[in-house]
Image (cartoon, helix red, strand yellow):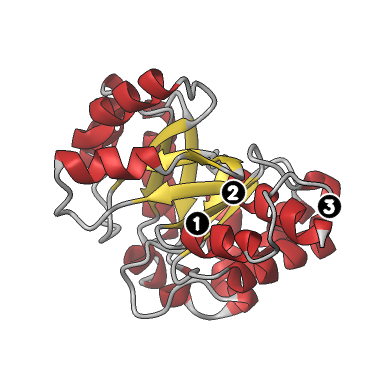
Amino acid sequence: MRDRYERAVQIVSLLDLTSLSGTESGADIDALCAKADGPCGHVAALCVFPQHLPRVLENLDRMGLAGVEAATVANFPAGRIDPAAAADEIRTAVRLGATEIDLVFPYAAFLEGRETAVGDFLATCRAACPVRLKVILESGVLARPEVIRAASRLALDCGADFLKTSTGKAAVHATPEAARVMLETIAERGGEAGFKASGGLRTMADAMVYLELTEDILGSGWVGPRTFRFGASGLLDDVLAVAAGGGAACDAPA
């Protein structure tokens, strides 16, 4: 069952291994970092709150994982419409070593019809962000396909490098229906931005739904760490368990 192993390796390489409970200790961060590399290779990024970035970077350096990104969040999770505060968060995170920023889109303001203010917010944050910017739409709150599409277009117009589904803190997380709208919007803009499925993904079967949907819309050759991510905390364990169930290492021949 080589395909199972290849898929496991692929999913691990696309994973933003995440811990955003707000109660993390130094030992918790060390434990997260220890999972960044394993029998199926290394993850794409570690995503933590900004104060933990220096510890993440120390761990990655010690482990020799220069290819793993140090990601963090801004305007999280409420998605306020305070561009100065969000830009300050971004600048602070970059000073602490962030190489990627996951920024929450002001979804409540957008739903109120304040599109110009939201656009100004995104432009201010983009100007403050010299690293990869992933915009979290909170698609479960935006809900309607036409609203998700409009928010996706606005985020891309304002310089988002990635569209991300969810914070994982709302009642509704990622859904294939929302993902399809976001991916179609990325495709209509030439496939230059990336996509991140996040929120509620716990199993390899969950991940495969989004991977196959993306391949259907943008092609299998489009998928890679620079264009596609999974955001999750528990997904890695299930992927490794599925791979191990095949009775061989992930990179073993069939």
Q: Nearer the viewer, mark 2 or mark 3?
A: 2
Horizontal and vertical percent position of residue 68:
50, 31
**How many angstroms separate mark 2 from mark 1 (CA)?**
7 Å
The residue under label 2 is 12
Helix, strand or loop under label 3: helix
- Whether 212 is drawn above or below 45: the answer is below
Q: Residue furthest front?
A: 247
The residue under label 3 is 220
Q: Could you tell me which residue is drawn at 66 percent across and 43 percent down?
A: 227
Residue 169 appears left or right of 208? left
* Category of crowding for the residue at label 2, using alpha-carbon neighbours closer than 10 angstroms: few (below 14), some (14–19), many (at least 20): many
Horizontal and vertical percent position of residue 47:
37, 43
Q: Mark 2 or mark 1: name the one nearer the start of the chain.
A: 2
Q: Amino acid at mark 1?
A: Leu
Q: Quadrant of residue 178?
A: bottom right
Q: Could you tell me which residue is drawn at 46 percent across and 27 percent down?
A: 131
Mark 2 vs 3: CB contact within 8 A: no
Q: Amino acid at mark 2?
A: Val
- Whether 4 is drawn above or below 178: the answer is above
Mark 2 vs 1: CB contact within 8 A: yes
Horizontal and vertical percent position of residue 11:
63, 53
Using the image, tell me which numbered label, if any, was put on residue 236: 1
- Whether 206 is drawn above or below 120: the answer is below
Q: Mark 2 or mark 3: name the one nearer the start of the chain.
A: 2
Horizontal and vertical percent position of residue 143:
49, 79
